Image (cartoon, helix red, strand yellow):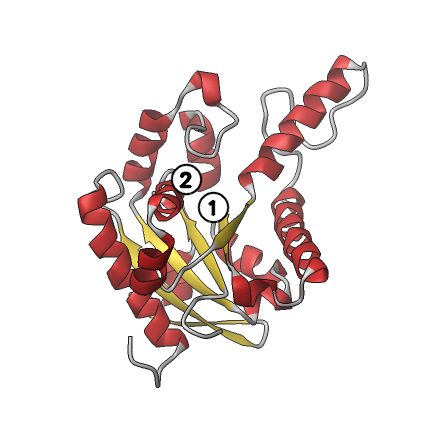
């Protein structure tokens, strides 16, 4: 792995700040990014495009006079199995990249991004992640309250860019239905850094507290990310100096 992360699983509530973190990293000089955050060149695998695609496919099917498959007319999922389908899509994208280049993760960091809610949302998602991801990964959880998640979700919405990673949003009733609770505190034991046992893998994690918000100010975000990535690096490389 050298001095860079191979894979980071970046998770949190909707609008917690995941996309803003990635946008900040994109805008940071590559040499500085590697030195401060242990991230050089990187690629993203975000499940939001897969989620949005299910809505689009169902709309097209309906236009063709066929029944919807994945979602209802008011855009609720027809079953919880679809959350695992999106994780399998992430796995597929990751494996395709490795198939094209077995050294892929030694040359680029892969940022895997998703949100989950419910009593076992993250636990269920983790259980479906591929071994190829879990064996290389550390987790960064961006921590905000449900109320803050709702506030930022409303703030970021741009109807003209509803399909974009930075500007999509959920109606309040769907936030309530899908994301009122999550299981991160249970999985992490309330710790700010440590390891989570997932299918035989001890996966390191670190928590980035983003309330009060720091992802809206690059002057605050850079130092905050430096701390959280240093904490994750220490978990993944306990004998190495950060």
Residue at the extreme bottom: 239
Element under label 1? loop
Q: Which residue is mark 1?
A: 115
Q: Residue at x 36, y 75 (%)?
A: 235
Question: Quick check: 79 above or below 161?
Answer: below
Q: Residue at x 63, y 56 (%)?
A: 94
* Pointer 2 local density, CA inside 10 Å: few below 14, some 14–19, many at least 20: many
Element under label 2? loop
- Lower position in the chain sequence, tag 1 or tag 2: 2
Query: Is 236 or 59 nearer to us in this picture?
Result: 236
Instruction: Give the percent coordinates (x, y) of residue 52.
Output: 59, 31
Residue 191 seen from this side: no
Instruction: Give the percent coordinates (x, y) of residue 204.
Output: 42, 71
- Residue 40 shown left or right of residue 68 in the figure: left
Query: Is 152 or 69 nearer to us in this picture?
Result: 152
- Kindly report the distance in space between the C-alpha atoms of the residues bearing marks 1 and 2: 6 Å
Is there CB contact under 8 Å for labels 1 and 2? Answer: yes
Query: Is 125 or 60 nearer to us in this picture?
Result: 60
Q: Quadrant of the C terminus?
A: bottom left
Q: Which residue is mark 2?
A: 14
Q: Residue at x 29, y 44 (%)?
A: 145
């Amino acid at each position: 792995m050298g001095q860079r992360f191979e894979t980071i699983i970046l998770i949190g509530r909707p609008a917690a700040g995941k996309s803003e973190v990635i946008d900040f990293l994109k805008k940071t000089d590559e040499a500085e990014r590697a030195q401060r955050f242990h991230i050089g060149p990187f690629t993203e695998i975000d499940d939001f495009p897969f989620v949005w695609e299910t809505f689009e496919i169902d709309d097209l099917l309906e236009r063709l006079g066929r029944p919807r498959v994945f979602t209802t007319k008011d855009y609720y999922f027809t079953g919880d199995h679809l959350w695992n389908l999106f994780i399998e899509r992430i796995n597929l994208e990751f494996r395709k990249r490795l198939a094209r280049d077995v050294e892929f993760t030694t040359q680029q960091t892969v940022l895997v991004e998703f949100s989950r809610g419910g009593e076992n949302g993250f636990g269920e998602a983790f259980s479906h992640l591929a071994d190829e991801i879990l064996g290389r990964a550390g987790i960064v959880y961006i921590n905000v309250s449900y109320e803050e998640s709702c506030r930022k979700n409303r703030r970021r919405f741009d109807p003209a860019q509803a399909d974009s990673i930075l500007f999509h949003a959920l109606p309040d009733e769907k936030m309530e239905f899908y994301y009122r609770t999550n299981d991160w505190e249970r999985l992490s034991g309330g710790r700010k850094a440590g390891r989570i046992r997932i299918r035989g893998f001890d996966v390191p994690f670190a928590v980035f507290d983003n309330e009060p918000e720091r992802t809206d100010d690059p002057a605050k975000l850079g130092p905050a990310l430096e701390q959280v990535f240093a904490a994750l690096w220490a978990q993944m490389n306990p004998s190495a100096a950060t």
